[in-house]
Image (cartoon, rainbow, N blue to C red):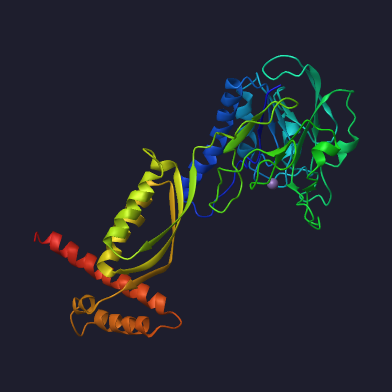
């Protein structure tokens, strides 16, 4: 029996950094990934898709957000989709699972809200068939944080002798030797303790596998450059009882990268531009970059950086977040001289230059303000030059 194991779609997730356009794209991507998972399952001759929790990002999504992933799954009636709640979408009164029961689900979309073993039928056809009776052992979270191991029930779950036992759960695997007080902690040896042939896990984005015969499905495609939900970015194709799952298969479109650069002159700006543009091949719109900058630039170079990186590359990528706290802006006497003497602007610039040079609290803000002031003046001169045809 081939299964596709996925988790943490977190449909409806909001991203604080994103503008409306980017947010719409990122939210839609989560739905598109469901279709890709369905097509992958068909291509791999898998009959079941196990979704290990956190299908929705929030406990109370809008009606449209609630229905959208169901509608995507509806388009694959030849596949059985098995869903359990996670900590983002717990099974609470009036929550997503209650609402789904009222709306009604397609017959091939199965929601598991209790730890009752579910018969999947005889595993006798298709690649990796074991000839055994297959059972699904779901672990359903009924609270956001269950202070117990949600998979403990699998020890006692009774299935016919010789059955293939497939666990489905959401939570963290307890590190060996840890105190074990965090919520939803799953025993690392649960699969062997409960006689499982495969334990499909969701929630943790840090490691595959999680233990013998226990796997997290999606860890590589992140929706933050420091980790975060897998967003349906990767899935595992497994034959429980037969083989270890194959290497994670990509179903996500976006590439999230953390980059760092030191800028000290035009060559650095050019190199950075090339580096960032190369990340997405011929489609930079699938790339999101968190960029940290260090170094120092003069005002002309800073204007070049703004033009080429922040505005140029920033318009090419899906998102470019820049932390430029480590990038100093240096001004030269020539910059100040260009302002002329005696004007209010010159007086402000002199004070800012003094504060920036003095060091201490706020010197970086003063330097930044000065560079911006000089950039504005430069821009004004350029526009005046253009307007008068010089
Ligand atoms: Mn989770």
Please report the residue visible at 81 percent of the width from the left and 55 percent of the height from the top: 180
Please report the residue visible at 78 percent of the width from the left and 56 percent of the height from the top: 178
Please report the residue visible at 84 percent of the width from the left and 33 percent of the height from the top: 195
Give residue 57's position: percent from left, percent from top. Answer: 64, 45
Residue 300 visible in this rendered orientation of the protein:
yes
> Which quadrant of the figure contains the C terminus?
bottom left
Q: Give the residue furthest to the left.
A: 390
User: Where is residue 200, by image quadrant?
Assistant: top right
Camera-side residue: 235 or 244? 244
> Is 249 rendered above or below residue 47?
below
> Is 54 rendered above or below residue 108?
below
Give residue 236's position: percent from left, percent from top. Answer: 63, 33
> Is 233 rendered above or below residue 367?
above
Camera-side residue: 145 or 194? 194
Give residue 153's position: percent from left, percent from top. Answer: 87, 39
Q: Does 8 sit left or right of 314 as displayed?
A: right
Please report the residue visible at 46 percent of the width from the left and 48 percent of the height from the top: 288
> Which quadrant of the figure contains the N terminus?
top right
Give residue 63's position: percent from left, percent from top. Answer: 64, 38
Tally the marks. Answer: 0
Residue 139 visible in this rendered orientation of the protein:
no
User: Where is residue 259, by image quadrant?
Assistant: bottom left
Q: Does 94 sit left or right of 322 as displayed?
A: right
Camera-side residue: 65 or 207? 207
């Amino acid at each position: 029996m081939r299964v596709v194991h996925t988790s943490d779609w977190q449909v409806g997730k909001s991203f604080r950094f994103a503008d409306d356009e980017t947010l719409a794209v990122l939210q839609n991507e989560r739905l598109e990934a469901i279709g890709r998972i369905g097509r992958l399952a068909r291509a791999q001759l898998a009959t079941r898709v196990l979704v290990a929790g956190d299908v929705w990002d929030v406990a109370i999504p809008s009606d449209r957000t609630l229905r959208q992933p169901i509608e995507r799954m509806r388009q694959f009636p030849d596949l059985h989709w098995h869903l359990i709640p996670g900590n983002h979408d717990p099974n609470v009164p009036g929550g997503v699972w209650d609402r789904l029961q009222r709306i009604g689900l397609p017959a091939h979309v199965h929601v598991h809200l209790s730890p009752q073993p579910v018969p999947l039928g005889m595993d006798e056809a298709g690649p990796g068939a074991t000839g055994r009776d297959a059972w699904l052992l779901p672990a359903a979270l009924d609270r956001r944080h269950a202070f117990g191991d949600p998979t403990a029930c699998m020890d006692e779950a009774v299935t016919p002798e010789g059955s293939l036992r497939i666990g489905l759960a959401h939570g963290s695997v307890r590190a060996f030797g840890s105190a074990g007080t965090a919520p939803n902690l799953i025993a690392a040896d649960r699969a062997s303790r409960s006689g499982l042939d495969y334990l499909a896990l969701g929630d943790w984005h840090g490691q595959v596998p999680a233990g013998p015969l226990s796997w997290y499905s999606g860890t590589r495609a992140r929706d933050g450059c420091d980790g975060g939900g897998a967003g349906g970015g990767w899935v595992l194709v497994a034959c429980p009882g037969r083989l270890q799952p194959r290497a994670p298969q990509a179903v996500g479109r976006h590439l999230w990268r953390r980059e760092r650069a030191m800028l000290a002159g035009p060559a650095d700006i050019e190199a950075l531009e090339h580096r960032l543009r190369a990340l997405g091949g011929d489609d930079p719109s699938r790339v999101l970059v968190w960029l940290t900058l260090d170094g120092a630039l003069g005002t002309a170079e800073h204007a070049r950086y703004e033009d080429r990186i922040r505005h140029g590359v920033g318009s090419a990528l899906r998102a470019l977040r820049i932390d430029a706290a480590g990038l100093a802006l240096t001004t030269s006497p020539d910059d100040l001289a260009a302002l002329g003497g005696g004007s209010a602007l010159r007086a402000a610039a002199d004070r800012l230059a003094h504060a920036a040079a003095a060091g201490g609290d706020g010197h970086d803000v003063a330097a930044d303000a000065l560079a911006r002031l000089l950039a504005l003046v430069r821009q004004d001169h350029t526009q005046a030059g253009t307007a008068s045809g010089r």
